[in-house]
Image (cartoon, grey):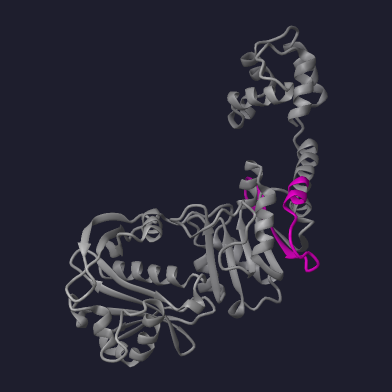
């Protein structure tokens, strides 16, 4: 029995599920792969499938997920159905194709197979001293399921048995559904051949974007990265470093820029996108901010390459921009980019959302006819809507920074106006 269960690829072909009888035809390729990944674990000759399954598994019940690069076997997962879980007994990825998302795809294929079999969990055993692996799997939602010891014939070494439920969060799409974004990609990515291209979703969360880009558009390699290890390759996309597996041909960002603007880390995300892309790569941004503002923020590193706008009824429209990495920029200057973004943001928010206009000046002069305690000054300075996003504790910290000291004395009218100019 053979079943092609994943043709999305990572510039690697398909993942195929085979019975042990069908996997035998790839025995020598499996021996070479296992030897490269686990030196000494399999014999130089003899039945390699039995060696991998071990005497403790019924070989006829085992299933094999094989990943191919052309005709070469470059990845393998050995699955053993139990009564209450699907055991991921062995996972191997050829050294030459690591850090390209293949291991995650094999794990995802295992999860989907457990669902097909009606099994609620995926389980596996990890060496008790493999701290990095244990940390990674626990972060992905796996929990300790009791200790185990290798069976007779293997090295006696303590193992930790882990298991994780196969159910996961339903996808959540920021700003745009796939049906709204997909029609725009032909124009925005003109000249990009998806079958030979790679893509990264910066801040993927639970979005289905990566799967859709592979399955519906045909991207050869797609990786989602997120700060939360449950959602993709672990990477702080706002810290400026290149995403794992870089370089990519296209980077996607569905509201991650909007989030970093709120956090004050837009420069880090833009630098991450720049360093994650190959020369001339495209950066597709979905944002609630005006296109001119987004393009100005990215200007030191990216050139405009296309714009679209998606209406959403009564909700604000979403700008979808394509920015092209500037070939003349060899690398980003982190400090210069941070200063540039601060300047662009100050100019934009000062004009678009001013804290001070003449009507507000007059209202504050009335409110501050005498000095007010800082708690009262906070309520007089900011509207109820503004206070939802700006806590009293943050206000007190900003007042201390403005005054250059930690004093908590009352605030008069002229100081209140000067503080708002400082806060802008």
Q: Is residue 220 left or right of residue 333?
A: left
Going by the picture, which residue comes out furthest to the top? 370
Examine the rendered structure and indicate whether residue 77 appears above or below residue 346.
below
Q: Position of residue 275 (x, y in %)?
A: 67, 62
Q: Position of residue 287 (x, y in %)?
A: 66, 52
Is residue 9 shown to the viewer in this render? no
Examine the rendered structure and indicate whether residue 173 appears above or below residue 344.
below
**Snapshot quadrant of residue 349:** top right
Going by the picture, which residue comes out furthest to the right? 358
Nearer to me, 201 or 51: 51
Is residue 161 shown to the viewer in this render? yes
Magenta stretch containing residue 315, yes or no? yes
Q: Quadrant of the C terminus?
A: top right
Nearer to me, 129 or 103: 129
Q: Is residue 4 left or right of residue 382?
A: left
Image point 59% across, 27% down: which residue?
Answer: 391
Nearer to me, 78 or 304: 78
Nearer to me, 332 or 372: 332
Image point 32% across, 80% down: which residue?
Answer: 64
Image point 26% across, 68% down: which residue?
Answer: 86
**Snapshot quadrant of residue 319:** bottom right
Q: Quadrant of the N terminus?
A: bottom left
Residues drawn in magenta = 310-339
Q: Position of residue 43 (x, y in %)?
A: 29, 86
Image point 31% across, 58% down: which residue?
Answer: 164
Examine the rendered structure and indicate whether residue 352 appears above or below residue 329.
above
Q: Is residue 103 left or right of residue 51?
A: right
């Amino acid at each position: 029995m053979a079943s092609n269960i994943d043709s999305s690829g990572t510039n690697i072909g398909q993942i195929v599920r085979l019975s042990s009888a069908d996997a035998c035809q790839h025995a020598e390729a499996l021996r070479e792969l296992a030897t490269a990944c686990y030196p000494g674990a399999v014999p130089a000759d003899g039945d390699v499938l039995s060696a991998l399954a071990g005497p403790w598994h019924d070989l006829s019940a085992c299933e094999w997920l094989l990943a191919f690069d052309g005709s070469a076997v470059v990845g393998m997962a050995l699955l053993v159905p139990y009564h209450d879980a699907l055991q991921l007994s062995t996972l191997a990825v050829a050294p030459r194709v690591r850090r390209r998302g293949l291991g995650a795809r094999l794990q995802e294929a295992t999860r989907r197979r457990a669902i097909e079999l009606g099994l609620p969990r995926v389980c596996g055993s990890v060496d008790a001293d493999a701290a990095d692996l244990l940390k990674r799997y626990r972060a992905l939602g796996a929990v300790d399921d009791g200790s185990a010891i290798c069976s007779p014939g293997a090295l006696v070494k303590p193992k930790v048995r882990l298991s994780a439920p196969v159910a996961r969060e339903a996808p959540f799409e920021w700003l745009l559904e796939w049906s709204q974004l997909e029609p725009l990609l032909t124009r925005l990515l003109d000249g990009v051949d998806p079958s030979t291209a790679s893509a990264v979703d910066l801040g993927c969360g639970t979005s289905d974007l990566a799967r859709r880009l592979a399955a519906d558009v045909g991207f050869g390699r797609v990786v989602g990265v997120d700060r939360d290890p449950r959602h993709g390759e672990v990477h702080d996309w706002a810290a400026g470093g290149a995403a794992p597996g870089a370089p990519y041909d296209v980077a996607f960002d569905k509201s991650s820029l909007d989030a970093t603007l709120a956090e004050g880390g837009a420069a880090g995300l833009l630098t991450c996108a720049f360093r994650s892309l190959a020369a001339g790569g495209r950066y597709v941004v979905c944002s609630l901010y005006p296109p001119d503002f987004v393009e100005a923020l990215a200007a030191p590193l990216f050139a405009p390459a296309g714009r679209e706008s998606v209406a959403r009824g009564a909700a604000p429209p979403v700008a979808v921009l394509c920015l092209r990495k500037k070939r003349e920029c060899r690398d980003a200057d982190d400090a210069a980019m941070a200063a540039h973004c601060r300047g662009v943001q100050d100019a934009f928010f000062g004009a678009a959302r001013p804290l001070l206009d003449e009507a507000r000046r007059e209202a504050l002069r009335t409110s501050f006819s005498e000095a007010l305690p800082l708690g009262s000054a906070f309520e007089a300075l900011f509207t109820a809507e503004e206070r939802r996003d700006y806590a009293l504790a943050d206000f007190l910290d900003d007042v201390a920074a403005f005054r250059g000291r930690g004093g908590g004395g009352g605030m008069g009218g002229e100081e209140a106006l000067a503080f708002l100019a400082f806060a802008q």
